Image: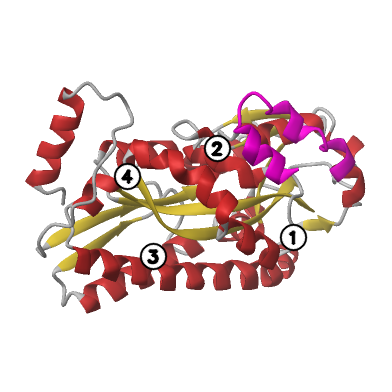
């Protein structure tokens, strides 16, 4: 439930002439009862939703139910872009979505999605918990978005409806669904595919209807959302690491007392650890499960893919902060 004070605050932000992004100050109000709406585009079995269930339990336990968390999965409150917009506008309290999906508001945030930056989860986690990611996320403070934790979505892989992917040449001409993430789209273009954006909530039906030749997502997303029912082949490309921002509206955060803010921060850290544990284990386990469901799994030579996408950083020289790009290089 959105409290009246937040509605008033949102109205005042709009009236002061600030556009889509409005800065909020953290004053730490008095402890009070509140219900937080948490929205997700994916199914309840998805690790981001499972981890947020732990967040909910921790928060409600620590506050004796004074702060409640309502979890809305399966796109009930909207697509990823709609949920992020809801957080920015203060209409949705919490969401978790790929960092690149926040790029419309803070372009530098998606910097961790550049192709083949990391070899494994430990490298990726060290990066997103470090100073470069923190610097990239500074813009979000002006957009009513506060990052509580860095969830994990895994390493993105390609699935296809017909042909197997064994080399870069097999990517040529593939009409592939991607999120509205410019780095991922550019990566697909450099590999010879034809990326087209579609909301995740519409992806299953679009694949079923043959609107795309392919799509790309991490293994846990492919399995948990049953994309194996509408795709025949999986190529372990691991072309882009997908960090997710577990974020709260700054206007919601500012209404909480400092004590309650600390409770949410502690719960978010536990949820982050849970999410990462699930993603890592599911990535390892679900490849076999996808094979059991009838998918053909290939392991193309990634050195060829790395060479084909090596110019991706240079493509964004005018988009991303130069200092951040130099650190990426």
Residue at 11% across, 65% down:
31
Left or right of 238: which side holds 307? right
- The quadrant the C terminus occupies is top right
List the residue tagged with mark 4.
77
Left or right of 242: which side holds 53? left
Question: Label 1, label 3: how many angstroms apart (C-alpha)?
Answer: 31 Å
Can residue 175 be seen here?
no
List the residue tagged with mark 2.
108
Residue at 63% across, 63% down:
126
Question: Label 3, label 4: how many angstroms apart (C-alpha)?
Answer: 16 Å
Mark 2 vs 3, N-terminal side: 3
List the residue tagged with mark 3.
52
Circles 2 and 3, Cβ within 8 Å, touching? The answer is: no
Residue farthest front in this picture: 323
Q: How crowded is mark 4: few (under 14 residues within 10 Å), some or many (20 or more)?
A: some
Question: Label 4, label 2: how many angstroms apart (C-alpha)?
Answer: 26 Å
Circles 4 and 1, Cβ within 8 Å, touching? The answer is: no
Question: Label 1, label 2: how many angstroms apart (C-alpha)?
Answer: 39 Å
Q: Nearer the viewer, residue 161 or 69?
A: 69
Q: What stretch is highlighted in magenta?
A: 306-329
Mark 1 vs 2, N-terminal side: 2
Image quarter of residue 148: bottom left
Left or right of 320: which side holds 67? left
List the residue tagged with mark 1.
294
Question: What is the x, y in percent for residue 170?
Answer: 88, 38
Q: Is residue 320 magenta?
A: yes
- Under tag 4, what secondary structure? loop
Q: Which of 324 and 256 is in front in this view?
A: 324
């Amino acid at each position: 439930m959105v409290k009246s004070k937040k509605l008033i605050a949102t109205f005042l932000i709009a009236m002061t002439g600030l556009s889509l992004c409005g800065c909020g100050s953290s004053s730490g109000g008095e402890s009070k009862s509140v219900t937080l709406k948490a929205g997700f585009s994916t199914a309840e079995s998805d690790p981001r939703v499972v981890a947020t269930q732990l967040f909910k339990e921790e928060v409600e336990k620590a506050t004796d139910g004074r702060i409640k968390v309502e979890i809305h999965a399966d796109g009930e409150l909207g697509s990823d872009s709609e949920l992020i917009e809801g957080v920015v506008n203060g209409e949705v309290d919490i969401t978790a979505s790929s960092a690149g999906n926040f790029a419309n508001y803070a372009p530098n945030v998606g910097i961790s999605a550049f192709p083949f930056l990391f070899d494994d989860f430990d490298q990726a986690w060290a990066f997103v918990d470090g100073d470069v990611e923190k610097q990239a996320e500074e813009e979000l403070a002006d957009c009513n978005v506060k990052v509580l934790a860095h969830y994990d979505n895994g390493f993105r892989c390609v699935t296809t409806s017909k042909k197997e992917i064994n080399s870069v040449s097999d990517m040529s001409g593939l009409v592939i669904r991607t999120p509205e993430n410019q780095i991922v789209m550019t990566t697909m273009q450099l590999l010879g595919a034809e990326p087209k954006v579609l909301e995740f909530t519409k992806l299953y039906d679009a694949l079923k209807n043959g609107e795309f030749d392919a799509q790309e997502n991490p293994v846990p997303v492919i399995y948990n959302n049953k994309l194996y029912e509408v795709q025949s082949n999986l190529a372990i490309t691991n072309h882009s690491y997908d960090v997710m921002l577990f974020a709260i509206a700054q206007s919601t955060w500012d209404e909480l007392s400092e004590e309650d803010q600390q409770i949410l921060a502690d719960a978010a850290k536990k949820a982050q650890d849970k999410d990462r544990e699930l993603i890592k284990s599911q990535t390892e386990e679900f490849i076999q499960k996808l094979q059991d469901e009838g998918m053909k799994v290939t392991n193309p030579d990634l050195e060829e893919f790395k060479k084909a996408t090596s110019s991706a950083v240079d493509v964004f020289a005018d988009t991303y902060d130069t200092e951040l790009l130099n650190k990426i290089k």
